[in-house]
Image: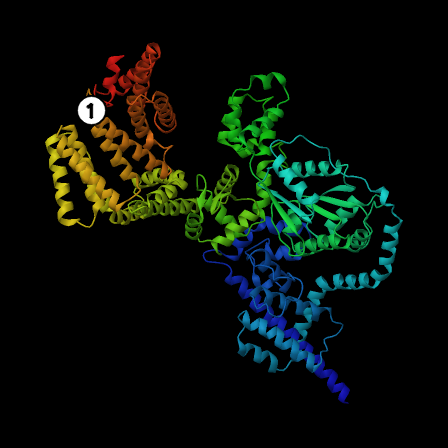
Amino acid sequence: MNSVLDSSEEKTNGTKLLRLVVDGGMHVLREYLQNCIVSPLTLQDVLNNHSPKLKYLKSKKIITNTQWHRLFPSAGPPDSQTFDITLLHLLLREVCGLTAPVPNGWNEIPVDTDTSDEANIVRIKVLRNKLCHGKSTGISNVEFQDEWQTIVKSLVALGLKQEEVDRLKTEPIDHDTERRINEEVEKWKMDFEPRVDKLENDYLTVKGEISAIQASISEQSISEHTNCLPDKNDIFGRSKEVEQILSAIQTKKAAAVLVTGGPGFGKTAVAIEVGHELASNLNEDRIVLFCPLRSKATIGEVATSLILTCSASHSQPPAHPQHWLRNWSKQQQKKVSFILDNADDVLESEDRTAFVTILRDMRTLSNCKITFVITTRKVFKDPNLPTQHVRLPPLSLQHAKELLVCKVLDPDVKQELSKTDKLVQLCGCVPLALCIVGSLLSDCPEDQLINRLEEKPLDVLREDEGDENSVEKAIDTSFNFLRESEQKALVLLSVFPGSFSYNAAQAVIQAGGCQGDPLSILLSLKNRSLIETPAPHRYQIHQFIQTFAKKIHQTKKSPFLQQQGENAACIHFISHLVDIANLYWSKDKCQEAIRSFNLDRHNFEYFFQFFIKRLKNQDPQLKKTMENLVEKISQTCTFLEMCTLPGNSAEAKIQFNTSLKVCEQHLQNDPVQKGVSLLYSGRYDKLQKDYTIAEKKLTEALQLYQESLGNHVMTAILLEYLGDFHLFHGEETLGSADDQQNSFKLYKQAVEMMESLGIRDQQGCIMALAKLGLCYQLQGEMEGAKDLFQVSLKIAEQELAENHRWKIYVMTQMAYWYKENGDTEEAKVWKQKALRMSETLELPDHQPPNKFLLNAI
């Protein structure tokens, strides 16, 4: 009698556990899924956004037809109430951006210390599988208590109320409840039990088959293995990366080398080149095997591909490919290097851990004779599988041109090419793009191809209409592996015209409402080779990926997303500019401010133009931002505006005197403002030939800047202005010998200070270099003078407009130098250049101030 009662109680225990999983488990997972969907998005929106990835999972039979119809019903929106635990678990994993528990992943019970949401979700699924797999629902009291506590802890942590747990434990199981639970279990078994039974049957035969596998491997003569590699193609500009990979493999620094790079960057070509180099090394007894893994997303598919690559005796894979590979690895006497090409699918799948495990086991069981070169856009790490990462950048300009020209088959067309620089620029130095464009040049004229690349680059960069081997297809593959928040972030980040900082990225990611930590999103994009890091703490998106992101943005009809990114970036950089300005006016901080400005100069220029355009359109958000910023910088700007030279000299004098009085009365603790006023006022006095007053004001301004700003651009400018004061007393004369000596010292100090600030090769140093050159010439040091003139002119050509008065100044000095050096003809050539440019600019006879030197030529 007791045994009957015990049996009945054990059956009730099993049913209660099942009810807890059915009613409690599905409830919390469903609620968790809903909480992951941020308003105004709906479940249907989220599924539609992830449809490419879900279609891919369906193609791999990870999603069944029944589940697919629940996700995308023929009529009406999807209803999460129809989702079972299996489907809910899959959606949480693939759609909601959760991270697999470490180290056991999504399919094994997590470690006890892992209390994350992900670990609790896995525990619910694992117990469901265990109960579903059991031959009966009978569970002993001791086991019941253990299982109940484990699953309750996970359910409560995920949001199930304790009152509901207590109800499910104490409430009797009636007939209807038992029937409902049993029906649910039967549904699970229809999907799950056939696979479990197959696994059980497989397990029963494994032991017997292992011996057969070992015998099969032992019968294969080691000598039957030969190199298995595709044909070798010419590659350009990758010798450094090839050498890095070879070194890592041959010196045993790494068990696996990950070859990563942006879409179309030539990872496969580099790996094949490495394979041929390894195979041709007569100093090593090594077999090299190339194994393509494109579209191989399960460990079974990967293992099968490996076997068919390394075994000449198998036309069909063995029943247990992973066992076969492990035993095969034990038998190897030679070094074996596998080239695993396009491993992205398996690295992005549920079987990622299993994939890394089989590589690690093969390496260990072969006594470290087996190595791997893996091409992928996704970086991975495993503490037990030493890896080295080699990242492919875009090609250099020279190597890109060589590759482009190499792909032009028609010799006549190749001979007539004249715009390869432009074509290389439009191809972004991407090997795949260069190969496609090079092959098109035999059929399409350069100008026409350039126009098409400027208008629709991704449409041009296809090898065929099937689009299977195109730049866009390569980018799209990486894009579809991203979570929704990462896809959104990539579109937002595409607004930057060049490199950008983490703070800038954070500003646009948060403004766009992306879920998740911005740094984690950036690292994920970087690990998938969709973002590069051209310098420490700097990020950059390749031009093709930017074009793709903008195209996706337009296709998905989200017109405000990029606008949000542009507005956020604009506000960030205008605010950042104010911060840099404040830093600039701090003592001995000038160099730091200039360095910070130059890092984002392209962004400041781009978004300032955007800012002006949007202000003209009366954008209220940016208008408010501008008002706030003006309040912060108004003090800095006020006196600069007051000191701008007006047309009327009397009015100018009044403004300068007013400015100085305001500084004396209200800004006694602001030497910068007073220094600016003294500087402009002193320059004005010099123009009015009040030399004594001018020198006094300029000297006082210099002292103020030396004390308050120290090593600073403004201090250097004051040194240069004082040098001008001594060197050019009048409009047609140079200063005395003492004045020339004073100016030489001042110009030299100015140039040295600019050099220490890192701006010697920028436009602010052009005139100081030229004037210092003139001082060298006046002292008879002709070669030193010429060197400085040439450096000054070179910077002017790079930094200034085609016609500019500073260029005239330097040309005048060159003419004067040749005249003093006895070369009258060359002096006349430079004189004519200077005069023509002066006429173009319609400058008066005294501008620039050294023009009178031309009168002697």
814 vs 15, left or right, is left
Secondary element at tag 1: loop
Mark 1, residue position: 736
Q: Amino acid at mark 1?
A: Ser
For the C terminus, give its image quadrant: top left
Residue 99 image position (x, y, % from top left): 58, 59
Establish if 690 lies above or below 284: above
Does residue 643 appear in the picture of this structure? no
Q: Nearer the viewer, residue 330 or 93?
A: 330
Say which quarter of the image contains residue 761: top left
Which residue extends farthest top? 825
Say which quarter of the image contains residue 823: top left
Residue 609 image position (x, y, % from top left): 35, 37
Establish if 772 lies above or below 193: above
Residue 274 image position (x, y, % from top left): 69, 38
Residue 219 image position (x, y, % from top left): 89, 49
Label 1 packing within 10 angstroms: few (<14), some (14-19), many (20+): few
